[in-house]
Image (cartoon, grey):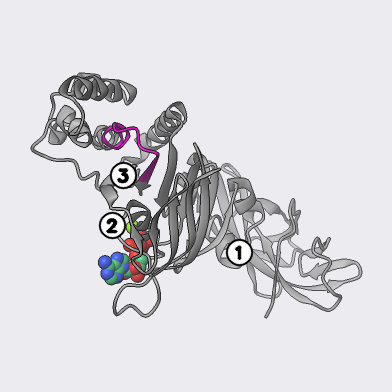
Amino acid sequence: MALLVLDAVTKRFPGAAAPAVERLALAAARGEILGLVGPSGCGKTTTLRLIAGFEAPDEGEILIGGRTVARAGGREFVPPEVRGVGIVFQDYALFPHLRVAGNVAFGLAERPAGTRRARTREVLDLVGLAAFADRYPHELSGGQQQRVALARALAPSPAAILLDEPFSNVDAELRAELREQVRELLRATGTTAVFVTHDHEEAFTLADRVGVLHAGRLEQLDAPEVVYHRPATPFVAAFVGDADFLGGTVTGAGIVTEMGTFPDPDGLPPGARVHLMIRPDDVGFTPDPEGDTVVVRRDFRGPVNVYCLRLPSGRRVHSSQPSTAILPPGTRVRATAELLHVVTFPIA
Ligand code: ADP
Ligand code: MG
């Protein structure tokens, strides 16, 4: 059974031209880690605030553990403090005047003092910060502050925890390690989590399923591999990785494009015009003075070089090549495309 359900939830802010969140429908299973990605302003924080109870929906319904916590029209509204949801804010929002232990114990105010102390110690152990219990937040690194915020959210054993851009204030070198720690922690405690980020790689590595938000609407919710290889919309295709699109025409032989003919997985009618998605890992090339394609640019990204190629039509596609493969702009090449998954979008 789903632990968290959003049923066609819409949130409008007064004066805004478009809803911040529009008919958002999703469900998280117990213990699932759900990642929501999208660009700045697409409604990520608003979604978390709706789940937490800091905002009320204008339409739709939110359920936690099978119980309605918010229903549009103000009929039902469970306040944040009794929703059983822990939150890790983007800036951590630690209390600067409280020590680490005091911060973690904050959400346990209702418990007897002995239980409070024991649970605080337990959770600090869990996040590996037992030795820092007496420090103040400003005496900790960003990564340590983040783990205190996580410990504080986990202390009352919430049904679910929400994390807003959890790693955006952490140094890049620490991020991968911290992601792994957070993932293990959520798994070990069986905690259902919804985290939001603008970074699709972060969502891919951490989440069981990834939802892609665009202007308040959920365009796809699937396993990371599905989102990457079978994006539901051109927006998703481009947001979760480099994507180029080739114009194609459906024929009896397949989809004909300027980079070759590809099988048509959708059984489209002959004559239909489509955009065919093509990713840099699908494109290869070999230098050839007679080639009809030209190297426009090379972006060195460390482990790979990403080449921008100009096809005879003038359309540009990108090609991912080994780090050591170096060709100057202007080089003539012969380009080929091998698609593992053929993804097309109809041309309106
Ligand atoms: P994200 O977290 O994805 O960057 P937000 O959920 O913060 O996006 O914002 C979504 C949209 O709602 C944006 O257009 C933002 O300006 C607007 N918005 C968010 N909070 C408020 C608010 N309290 N009042 C008015 N508009 C808001
Ligand atoms: Mg935000």
Q: Is residue 314 left or right of residue 105?
A: right
| x 13%, y 24%: residue | 134
Residue receiving disc 3: 87
Label 2, ligand 1: CB separation under 8 Å: no
**Alpha carbons under labels 3 and 1: distance apart:** 52 Å
Judge whether residue 152 is colored magenta. Answer: yes
Q: Which residue occupies 22% across, 36% down?
A: 107
Residue 26 x, y percent position in the rendering: 52, 55
Q: CA distance from mark 1 to mark 2?
A: 56 Å
Residue 332 occupies quadrant: bottom right
Q: Which residue is mark 2?
A: 54
Above or below, 106 against 224 in this view is: above
Q: Is residue 103 visible?
A: yes
Q: Point out the quarter of the image occupied by ligand 1.
A: bottom left
The numbered mark, 3 or 2, whose residue comes first in the sequence reads 2
Q: Is residue 187 left or right of residue 107?
A: right
Is 109 placed above or below 347 here?
above
Find out whether the residues at labels 3 and 1 contact each other: C-beta distance under 8 Å: no
- Between disc 3 and disc 1, whose residue precedes? 3
- Determine the residue located farthest toward the right in the rendered image: 252
Percent position of residue 88, x then y: 30, 43
Numbered range of the magenta stretch: 150-162
- Residue identifier under label 1: 330
Few, some or many C-alpha atoms within 10 Å of disc 3 (few <14, some 14-19, many ≥20)?
many
